[in-house]
Image (cartoon, rainbow, N blue to C red):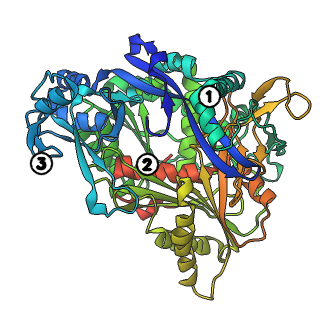
Amino acid sequence: MGRNLYDPSSSVQIPKHKLELWPGYVTSVSQLDGGFMLQTNVSHKMLRTDTVMDMLLEIHKTEPLNLQSRAVKEIVGHVVMTRYNNQTYRVDDIVWDETPRSSFEDRRGNKISYIDYYRDQYSIIIKDCSQPLLLHRMKPKRGQPQQDERLIYLIPELCAMTGLSQSTMDDFMVRKDIVAHTRLDPRDRIRAIKGFIYNVKESPEATAELRRWNLHIDDETLHVQGRKLEPEQIIFGGGVNANRHVVGERADFSQATSANPPITAVNLDNWLLICTQRDQNKGRDLVTVMKEGAKKLGMRVAAPVVLPLRDDRTESFIRAITSNQSEDVQLVVTIVPTDRDDRYNAIKQLCYIDSPVASQVIKSKTLSQPQKMRSVVQKIMLQINAKLGGELWACNIPLGNAMIVGIDTYHDPTSRAGFSFTGFVASMNKTTTQYFSTSRQEDRGQEFSSSLQNMMTAALKHYLEKNDTLPDRIIVYRDGVSEGQFSVVKQYEVTQFEAAFSHLEGGYTPQLVVVVVQKRIRTRMFYSEGEGNHGKGRVMNAPPGTVLDHTVTSDSLYDFYLVSQHVGKGTVTPSHYVVVQNTSNLKPDHIQKLSYKLTHMYWNWPGTVRVPSVCLYAHKIAYMHGQHLHRPAAPALQDKLFYL
């Protein structure tokens, strides 16, 4: 399927969740620093045993008046598989005014209905002749004009959904049953890969093809020498007596965040608490625990203006906010009984666009377990502090007068217009604890932003305003770029940065480093305790801070792999960093250490993450705009992490 190989005959059925797993492998051959190499990894294709038509019928049964909008949300943007030919397609739309009775022109130019086509071509009798059709826009091949886009119509009852729906992913028991089959530890993964290589070498056809190309595949995985960076120190509040915590092997410092105050705490003196009358007790408990927890954080939390509602209609929440909002209000907390996108979107649009104020939406269920209340509320308070402009923790980043930028693009799969949003986040101080955040709308499916010049200019002006000087050095981390697009980043996006510099007064020419960060890669790294070139000892996950910058890196790029996170179960995946521009005096070791430090700085998680924090912040603001706001947030919020 696509470029990957799967074995349907060895499929694993998970009937209670209506799921089916196809085991398989992904492979690629590359010319790397160490020579000509085969990359292979275990892969699984997740299929649902129910069809898209089953999903439509279920939606019609539960929400008949909301069928079309709900179906678009659940189906559009997802990938389906047609089992009659094992092909996969991304659903770009649902065509409600077409049915299997509709006709199209076949290759000979004859009109034929979908009913007749599937009967003649595949001996399939379509059961429901009134169902709508799914639309897939087949992109033109490279070199073909854009107008050559082909439209492919699919029959819902013949399509199986792939992957997992959001509701399924939120179900712990479903995840647990899937992980039991898909999450392999390093030893099992190596065993599976070696089994694949053995099967290839035992195949007469494969052996003959390899011989024809004068190629030989080693029996063993490649063994190389890596490096491990020193553990980082997390800096908390306390002024000159600031507490420092050395991060352990598990790269988790949640206990330290509970025991230490943030660098800067913002007092909460004027805020609104809105909930239904049924949730008033939970709201009262929330305020009590917040006041208790505030002492540890060095915050002051005043009593809120409590606004109980008779019902949970969206209009009721919006009316309560609008009637009580003023310039003095710092925060609007809403406790909602259920998880509804329309209500969440309306609250966020009001608070982030029309009447700019920090907003915290809490599901009632989150506050329903008294034994977990304190830990839940502590996380909420840390998030609130960050949204209000507080600074939670930091690492020592000895770059001096530098600005660190994160960029990512979010594509809304359910948007018929197909607009994308590019998130842009830039640090504003030496400790990388204050930020400027913005986002811009792009054309449909556009990965590369045409707005970077304007966003970089705005960030630099903001930096100048806060620091009375422009940064001497700018380091940009660009997420969401595939391997074939590195040159586009350099030619199209770096050019926009340089144009932004040239438009500032005084011939501004800062040192510039641009690093592409890749998460979705096939490369896996294992740590072997054994001696010699082919360690026979225990194989385990590479620990956080592991760097590999030779042999398996590109022979034409300036790149390295970094493992920043700890994985308790399964196999850790490194992140791939590619430096596409470097006019600074930063050496490879400096960029590697900086990248690792920044993975400790994501304030939504008291531990390390897979990519530098600025990339995750950029993704969060792009996601907030693309999924919920659909318009830029108010400029008054640009110096706050309001989107956490």
The numbered mark, 2 or 3, whose residue comes first in the sequence reads 3
Other residues around mark 1 within 10 Å, as few (<14) / some (14–19) / many (≥20)? some
Task: Give the spatial CA distance, label 2 vs label 3.
Answer: 44 Å
Local SS, label 3: loop
Disc 3 target residue: 109
Give the residue at the far right of this rendering.
531
Quarter of the rendering containing residue 187: top right
Height in image: 622 above or below 43? below
Mark 1 residue element: helix
Q: Which residue is mark 1?
A: 200
Label 2 element class: helix
Name the residue at 58% across, 74% down: 465
Res 434 quadrant in image? bottom right
Mark 1 against mark 2, which lies toward the viewer? Answer: 1
- Where's residue 520, x and y in %? 56, 43
Residue 445 lies, in percent from the top left, at: 37, 55
Q: Which amino acid type corresponds to the residue marked 2 in the rendered image? A: Tyr
Extreme residue in the top direction: 16
Residue 130 in percent (x, y) is at 9, 29
- Which is more toward the observer, 189 or 624? 189
Q: Are marks 1 and 2 in contact (CB under 8 Å)?
A: no
Image position of 500 with respect to 25: above or below: below
Nearest to the observer: residue 632 or residue 139: 139
Horizontally, is 139 left or right of 570 in the view? left
* Label 1 vs 2, first from the N-terminus: 1
Residue 294, visible in the rendered structure? no
User: How packed is label 3: few (under 14 Cα within 10 Å), some, or many (20 or more)?
Assistant: few
| Residue at numbered disc 2 | 623
Measured Cα–Cα span from mark 1 to mark 2: 43 Å
Name the residue rendered at 27%, 55% in the picture: 149
